[in-house]
Image (cartoon, rainbow, N blue to C red):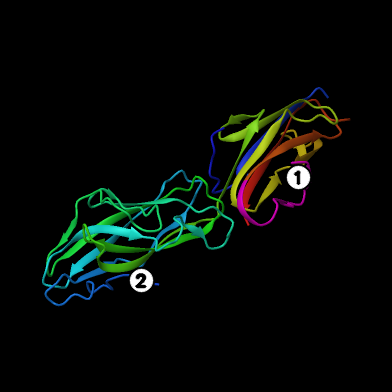
Amino acid sequence: MKRKHFAGPAAVAMAAALAFAPVAEAQNGIGNGNGNGNGPGECQLLIEPGSSRWTIESYDPHSGIPAYGQFQIAWINQGQKQCIGDVTVNLNGQQYGLRSQDVPTASLLPYGLVNESSGTDITPYTGSWSGPFNGPPLHVDPGERVIQTYGFSVDTQNLGADGIFQQTVTFGLRRRNSVIYDGLRDVTLAINVSASAVMGLTGAYQRHDGTARIELGELSPGRINDPVNLWVRSTRAYRVTIQSRNRGRLMQDSGEWVVPYGLSLGGVPIDLANLVPFQSQPGPGLRNDSYPFVVTVGQTAGQRAGRYTDLLTLTLAPI
């Protein structure tokens, strides 16, 4: 079954016949934004990111859209000598990956950094940079301001929760064949994962005009539908509210003849008369659940032969 993102409620129809849901500059290396302490006759490089925090905001992991953003850095030479080197990104000894700020046990999220201006991959896969350089060097002439665009992408395949994941890295310009950096600046890479949930049905049902339709066949007391399951994918705990148009009764179009029925979700009886929500286990963390969706027919004695129906509206919400 194709997954859908439910921005609103989902409907299930049933029918039957009766036989009767900080910017801070790095201080841990040579250079502090003024070019390695060089004199006025040397390269004096200043790094100005458009923001000290590069965040992919409001990312919905169920949207099918890649987690990607573009950000810019201005490289400014305030000295009297050309600055030449390769753009590098260092972790300063940290383990590579974005770390959840809310769920310590969540897996680190891999990410990528690409210098879109040169096409160079500058992802810091290890704690400190080690060559070789794999792209053309950056040249910044005295008095020049060079603006480059960087692509930041996050691999969410093993996402373990919603909320903010982040890592602080240090950008710098490293001279070739040297350990000297011109200009160092910290930037925090982050993704803000929205609380999100989707649901759908699998099993013995049909779809008609966008509504799932469960056929109950010929009604008899205690009869249940053929196997149907409600699946839920969520970034955290959630609730499912099920509203019955006829308050738990199968009804003929005239409204004069009714057959009561019961509904259970994963073995939990659902109160169709009072909108009591079904709730998952509490707590953070990714959910991938499936529940048997079982309809049980009540008493049919004394009811007129014909077609009986009800409409269920399922609403899913992360909590």
Residue for point 21% across, 57% down: 176
* Label 2 crowd (10 A; few <14 / some 14-19 / many >=20): few
Report the number of discs. Answer: 2
Q: Secondary structure at mark 1?
A: loop
Residue type at mark 2: give it: Asn
Report how far apart the C-alphas of labels 2 and 1 lie in the structure.
67 Å
Q: Using the image as rendered, state which of residue 198 and residue 273 is in the foreground.
A: 198
Label 1: which residue? 247
What percent of the width, then of the height, locates residue 157? Answer: 49, 45
Image disc number at residue 28 = 2
> Which part of the image, by quadrant, shows the C terminus?
bottom right
In-front residue for pair 61/136: 136
**Nearest to the observer: residue 105 or residue 8:** 105
The numbered mark at residue 101 is none
Rendered image quadrant of residue 311: top right
Q: Is residue 161 left or right of residue 300?
A: left
Q: Position of residue 158 (x, y in %)?
A: 52, 46
